[in-house]
Amino acid sequence: MIELIARLLSRPGVAVLLLLSSFVISILMLVPPIYVMQVLNRYVAFGVDGTLFTLASGALLAVAMEFLLRWARLRIANNVSVKADDELARKLGEFLTDTRLGQADQVKTSTKRRLMMDLEVVQSAYSAPSINTVLDVPFTAILIVAVLVIDPMLAAITVAACLFLTVCALASAAAEKHAARERTSSDRPAIGPIQDDIVSTPEVVRAFTGRTFVLHAWRTAVRAQQSVARKLAHNRGMISTISNATTALTTIAVVGVGAILVVRREIDVGILIAANILSARTVAGFSRFAFAAGTFARASQTLARLRQLEKMPREAKSGAMLGDFAGRLTFDDVTFAYGGTTAPLFEGVSFSLEPGDILIVHGGNGTGKSSFAELVMGLREPLRGAILVDGVDLRQVAMPWWRTQTCYLPQNTALLNTSISDNLRVLKPDLDGDALNRAIQAADARDLIARMPAGLETPIEDNGRHFAPGERKRLALARALTSQGKLVLFDEPLEGLDGSGKAAIGSLLKSFASSGRTIIVCSSDPAIIREADWLLDLDEKPRPKLVKGPGRKGRDTRSNLAVADNDAPAASQGGQA
């Protein structure tokens, strides 16, 4: 309810209109019982048709006004959550896209998916009908006062029913929270990964006879999900059953007690029927509130999880923008470790690269080549030390600017689920056709795109998994080449490529070298290593070794580098193995 109050306070004008309309609606709800009372006491007693016509006309007018007010209130209530829901979606999107990889990795993929799905729960909880249901509750006091005027005992019965339904609403909310915690419990099998196995990798399931394993995991996960779903459905069904039973029992009690009062001549039959109508409409409002309580509980949990995630550190959107990057990189005692590990992946990396240098980072699987590339891109932060960009700490640089200064080809060449054109223009949306065509040609991707049914406008699905690895690599390379940045950063560029693709990579590296760009390639391929000015060996642990490479320079031309054993340059002892 705190969230609902906050949303209403954020739109004070709308909140006032909603409160006023709810008050007037509650007053108009008094008309039907008054009409019944007047018809039975005046028309039935005297039989004057004009009296019935007048009473009926007034009642119909009141009902029409109530309908129009409810319709208008529904339209007004729609405005309460528009901005808040949009802000919530924006915050979740920013968390998923802006949180640093090291922090985001700590949140399970299933949790991220659940949050995205639960946005609908929040939107439903704070939708116009739910808001109006809550606003109706305090104004039922008007109906209760009307019953109190008729007889205190009848009012007591109505209040008791409302209090009972309020307790049921609190119990429903608690049950919904418990079920939600059970659904997200870490020891429950997640259904999302199993869905991915079945939908995205059917060839693996069949080729390795994994059908039995996958189906068993699927049934286990589905049973767990269905168990929680049944509990939720049972809870909601019980609330509906209890509400119906409470309404019926209230009617029995009001009519029973009212009948005694009629016999005692304390009230007449018309007043008894009016009291019953008032009591029923009051209880109905609380019944709707009890049913909505579970939705509010689920929404509050989603909001609580989102607020926790908001505290995670984000990438800097502001910072230094150095104009044109000259191409000088300095690694100053850089140490990196994944969260939860006991030892660093590598440490004490210290050296400098000048414009035009070619550094090859090599090592076995899992030695940290991709992590090194992600550090350079600013996707991850070092545990210790700093990476300097033209003398400025990368952490102080505006990341959007830095990404435009790099030509980055990651090892994981995932594509966005949009058209090929949008994928290639994602870094530069205003890229003109000639520049795009040059990037496609240089990436040896023209024939691939020509085979697509809609060319550049062909939609990509499943992040491009339907493409062969080499085809996906070509498209990712074309995307990288839309940048004219001075730093070229390729991670396993030859992986998955055929002969023509590898030739395209070789031509590109030679072109980049001749134009004086700084080049970092993460690869253990001998064809790549031959081009190295410097080799960083991540197989050496914990401090990688930096040595001269057999490339076009293969010599130390920088006065700030000392030559260690084997002519390996190092800015400090931390750079030696």
Image (cartoon, helix red, strand yellow):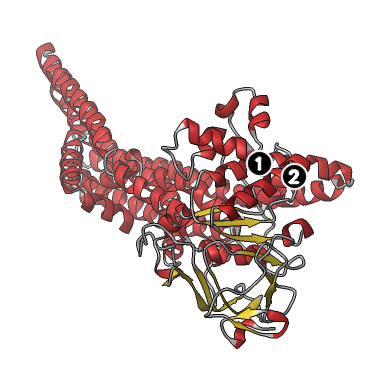
Tell me residue 379's x, y (percent): 52, 62
Which mark identifies residue 497? 2
Q: Kindly identify the amino acid type of the residue bearing the numbered disc 1.
A: Arg
Along the viewing direction, whichever of 557 and 90 lies nearer the viewer: 557
The residue that mark 1 highlights is 474
Tell me residue 242's x, y (percent): 47, 47
Along the viewing direction, whichever of 89 and 23 lies nearer the viewer: 89
Q: Residue placed at 48% from the left, 31% from the top?
A: 433
Q: Do the residues bearing badges 2 and 1 touch, measured as CB atoms within 8 Å?
A: yes
Q: Horizontally, is 381 left or right of 548 in the view?
A: left
Tell me residue 421's x, y (percent): 53, 33
Q: SS class of the residue under badge 1? A: helix
Tell me residue 478's x, y (percent): 59, 41
Q: SS class of the residue under badge 2? A: loop
Q: Quadrant of the C terminus?
A: bottom right
Is the residue marked by circle 2 packed among few (<14), some (14-19), or many (20+) residues within 10 Å? some
